[in-house]
């Protein structure tokens, strides 16, 4: 039973109960409809309260249901039923109050605004996050919301999808009352008052004046211009503007049909399929295969970070921002001072941009205790090591940490490539050792690769995932191979970028093709930020043992740049030139000359390379290596790889990640490309066996 019915003081209390978030799935809409109808027919009832059981009002329509909508016609039919049902609710003869706690999101807010009045707890939030799933509000939200709060606010909510606090929603007219106290008591009181006054109110009957319509159309035009830069590549935010605008010049009913038509087109789009895929993939990533759900996670109260450089500083900030006191150790005071200066600068900039109060900055900074000794490490529940990427140094550090920390302390390494098991052995307690691979800047980037060593204990993994979420990250458990998942795949992406350059594409052309595809920055622009020296040192280290990061030829251009001291932005030149104090990328003909020279040395005849080939080569390399990572068991599931690449390197979410994207263009196409590249470039292009098998069986990485 999705909705319970109880009468208190002549008020029917309808409680929606569909754990965990009262999503409006099959049967739930109908149960609400029936309960409201029953209340209207109940002689012992004067008014109705609709409330959610558990932690929230309603988090929206059940996102799983959209998968069943195969065609716009399916979606039109389904949404017609929802619209009609909400209209019946709005037509309730008895006052109908939505009582909101937790969230009223998406269909949940649309349900609430079809009620006559809304009361919310002061800490509740409301929102129309549909655009984040590639759709628009499809249950009247684009029609009722502007009538309640005006076009500007509705446009903002429907295009950015951000939650709006109840206090703000009250000012905007979206909720009518807020309460810091008991929600149900307040809602029942309000319902009784409205019944005694005989007051009902239908949002759909609020008139849109010609002036409002005119101003609204202008606001829509302005929003479209803004979205051209803020929502590049996305269709749904523009579709939401179309739906709102359509309602300004049509009747409510016609506007609603128009909304449904737009919703129906969006819900079957690749953009929506990709974004919904990632919604579930991000949640699935936190689940560790083979680990009993009841595996205890340890309580992390104090942390320590070793190494106050680029990563250590960012990691310490991440802990402090989550309210966890953290010791920050480096070799000497000078190194610590440098690290702390960067941390202070970052917090100052957050204050200057209004993202943080001065008071919160002081409180957060006070949680970071700089030190050059191991004093206090005995009390730490976790130590994150972020010293130079040098195996001998890291082994020495792990041995030292085992001596100064308690038996239960988690020893985590932020290494990008080194063997977690070797660090486990060096510590003498490998079951407590795990990789916590943050991405730069660690205080900003969401991805946390949790690297599982051979002996890492289940409770350390469970703790890592829970802690990662507490730190505001998206934790994904990966296996212990060179570069783990993200950097291992990146090596193939960079290999292709380098080879395409030697074949005749230019640095700006490759970067533009990749940003045109939807990544925020191209491979060369990214390497200029991260530092060309970082990759060069890893290559030198591997060369000693005759290894490369990806099989096949590697362009020597980055090594030439490294030898010239062109490390990227930090040295004022790398793949591009930079004027002092500026990050503007200025193309440098010198780099093209070096590329031409290296191409000659390798006997490569330069040619015209199209943007399509650039995108095809790079995405095929990612998908093929992703398939290998998956079948070798270094990722638990295909969707983890998509989450990793979207959050680690900004693969466009609306394409769903490298494996989802491969599936949208068709795995047979991807396999055919690998075979074509093998014929054209050499045997280092080998189809991943999993890719071949899936194509042979007519399957994909995902069930449709
Ligand atoms: N449909 C189906 N499942 C949902 C869901 C939804 N709308 N919202 C959350 N869930 C599921 C999650 O997948 C997760 O399942 P799992 O435990 O099996 O992994 C579980 O509920 C708990 O979710 P979270 O782990 O995200 O819990 P949090 O407490 O961290 O967050 C939340 C709760 C803020 C409500 C967050 O889940 C959220 O933002 N949900 C999505 C809200 C949304 O996008 N609503 C709009 C839906 S589209 C719509 O309404 C269309 C309409 O216009 C017709
Ligand atoms: P960095 O050079 O900026 O900082 C390293 C810091 O460690 C320096 O401050 C150094 O003084 C300190 N240090 C060296 N030996 C020490 C010791 N024995 N005790 C205490 N401190 C010591 O290096 P960065 O970039 O922060 O990298 C650190 C680690 O993080 C490396 O393992 C790297 O591979 C990894 N990493 C780096 C990323 C990046 O983008 N820079 C991304 C993800 C991981």
Image (cartoon, helix red, strand yellow):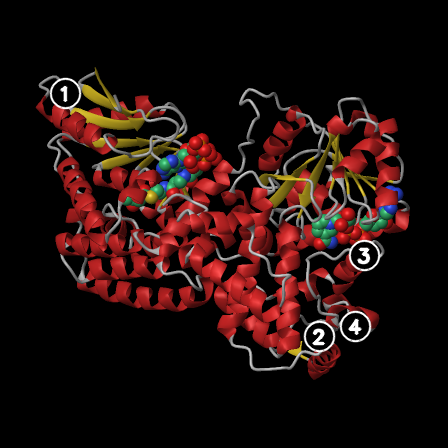
Residue at mark 4 to residue at mark 3: CA–CA distance = 19 Å
Among the two numbered marks 4 and 3 on one chain, the one whose residue lies closer to the N terminus: 3
Disc 1 or disc 3, which is closer to the eye? 3
Q: Quadrant of residue 679?
A: bottom right
Among the two numbered marks 2 and 4 on one chain, the one whose residue lies closer to the N terminus: 4
Residue at mark 1 to residue at mark 2: CA–CA distance = 73 Å
Quadrant location, the C terminus? top left
Would you say the residues marked 1 and 2 are in contact, meaning their CB atoms lie under 8 Å apart?
no
Camera-side residue: 646 or 260?
A: 646
Residue at mark 1 to residue at mark 3: CA–CA distance = 81 Å
Quadrant location, the N terminus? top left
Camera-side residue: 176 or 105?
A: 105
- Identify the secondary structure beneath mark 2: loop
**Could you tell whether 139 is left or right of 165 in the image?**
left
**Image position, residue 13 (x, y; %):** 24, 22
Residue at mark 3 to residue at mark 2: CA–CA distance = 35 Å
- Identify the secondary structure beneath mark 4: helix
- Identify the secondary structure beneath mark 1: loop
**Image position, residue 135 (x, y; %):** 33, 52
- Identify the secondary structure beneath mark 3: loop
Q: Which mark is residue 560?
A: 4
Q: Which residue lies at the image location 10% right of the left edge and 20% below the top edge?
A: 42
Name the residue tied to disc 1: 45
Among the two numbered marks 1 and 2 on one chain, the one whose residue lies closer to the N terminus: 1
Q: Is residue 438 above or below residue 92?
A: below
Name the residue tied to disc 2: 578
**Image position, residue 507 (x, y; %):** 63, 75
Residue density around tag 3, few if under 14, some if 14–19, many if 20 or more, within 10 Å: few
Name the residue tied to disc 3: 546
């Amino acid at each position: 039973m999705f909705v319970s019915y109880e009468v208190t003081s002549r008020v029917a209390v309808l409680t929606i109960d569909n754990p965990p978030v009262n999503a409006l799935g099959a049967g739930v809409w109908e149960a609400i409809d029936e309960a409201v109808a029953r209340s209207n027919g109940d002689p012992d009832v004067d008014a109705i309260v609709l409330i959610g059981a558990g932690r929230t009002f309603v988090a929206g329509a059940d996102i799983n249901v959209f998968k069943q909508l195969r065609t716009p016609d399916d979606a039109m039919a389904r949404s017609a039923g929802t619209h009609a049902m909400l209209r019946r609710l709005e037509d309730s003869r008895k006052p109908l109050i939505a009582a909101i706690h937790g969230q009223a999101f998406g269909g949940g807010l649309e349900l609430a605004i079809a009620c006559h009045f809304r009361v919310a707890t002061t800490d509740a939030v409301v929102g129309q996050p549909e655009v984040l799933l590639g759709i628009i509000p499809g249950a009247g939200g684009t029609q009722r919301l502007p009538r309640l709060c005006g076009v500007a606010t509705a446009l903002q909510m429907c295009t950015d999808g951000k939650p709006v606090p109840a206090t703000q929603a009250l000012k905007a007219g979206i909720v009518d009352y807020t309460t810091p106290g008991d929600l149900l008591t307040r809602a029942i009181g309000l319902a009784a008052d409205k019944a005694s006054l005989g007051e009902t109110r239908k949002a759909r009957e609020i008139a849109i004046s010609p002036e409002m319509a005119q101003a609204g159309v202008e606001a829509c035009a302005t929003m479209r211009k803004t979205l051209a830069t803020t929502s590049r590549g996305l269709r749904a935010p523009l579709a939401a503007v179309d739906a709102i605008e359509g309602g300004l010049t049509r009747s409510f009913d016609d506007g609603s049909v128009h909304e449904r038509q737009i919703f129906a087109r969006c819900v079957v789009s690749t953009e929506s399929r990709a974004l919904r895929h990632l919604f579930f993939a991000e949640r699935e990533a936190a689940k560790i295969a083979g680990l009993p759900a009841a595996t205890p996670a340890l309580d992390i109260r104090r942390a320590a970070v070793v190494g106050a450089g680029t990563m250590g500083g960012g990691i310490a900030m991440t802990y402090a921002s989550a309210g966890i006191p953290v010791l920050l150790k480096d070799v000497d005071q000078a190194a610590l001072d440098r690290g702390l200066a960067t941390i202070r600068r970052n917090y100052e900039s957050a204050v200057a941009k209004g993202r943080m109060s001065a008071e919160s900055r002081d409180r957060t900074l006070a949680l970071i205790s700089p030190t050059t000794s191991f004093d206090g490490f005995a009390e730490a529940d976790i130590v994150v090591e972020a010293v130079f990427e040098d195996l001998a140094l890291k082994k020495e550090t792990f041995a030292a940490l085992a001596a100064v920390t308690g038996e239960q302390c988690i020893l985590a390494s932020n290494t990008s490539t080194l063997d977690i098991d070797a660090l486990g052995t060096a510590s003498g307690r490998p079951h407590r050792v795990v990789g916590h691979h943050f991405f730069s800047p660690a205080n900003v980037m969401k991805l946390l690769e949790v690297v599982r060593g051979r002996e890492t204990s289940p409770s350390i993994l469970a703790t890592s995932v829970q802690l990662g979420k507490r730190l505001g990250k998206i934790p994904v458990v990966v296996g212990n191979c060179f570069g783990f998942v993200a950097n291992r795949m990146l090596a193939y992406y960079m290999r292709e970028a380098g080879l395409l350059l030697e074949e005749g594409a230019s640095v700006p052309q490759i970067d533009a093709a990749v940003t045109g595809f939807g990544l925020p920055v191209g491979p060369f622009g990214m390497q200029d930020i991260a530092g060309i020296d970082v990759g060069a040192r890893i290559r030198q280290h591997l060369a000693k043992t005759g290894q490369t990061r990806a099989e096949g030829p590697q362009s020597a251009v980055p090594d030439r740049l490294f030898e010239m001291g062109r490390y990227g932005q930090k040295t004022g030149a790398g793949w591009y030139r930079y004027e002092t104090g500026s990050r503007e990328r200025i193309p440098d003909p010198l780099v093209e000359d070096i590329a031409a020279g290296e191409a000659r040395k390798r006997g490569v005849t330069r040619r015209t390379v199209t943007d399509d080939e650039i995108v095809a080569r790079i995405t095929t390399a990612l998908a093929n290596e992703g398939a290998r990572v998956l079948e070798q068991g270094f990722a638990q599931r295909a969707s983890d790889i998509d989450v990793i690449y979207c959050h680690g390197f900004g693969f466009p979410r609306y394409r769903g990640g490298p494996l989802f994207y491969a599936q949208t263009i068709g795995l047979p196409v991807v396999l055919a490309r690998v075979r074509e590249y093998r014929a054209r470039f050499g045997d280092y292009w080998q189809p991943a066996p999993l890719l071949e098998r899936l194509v042979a069986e007519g399957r994909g990485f995902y069930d449709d």
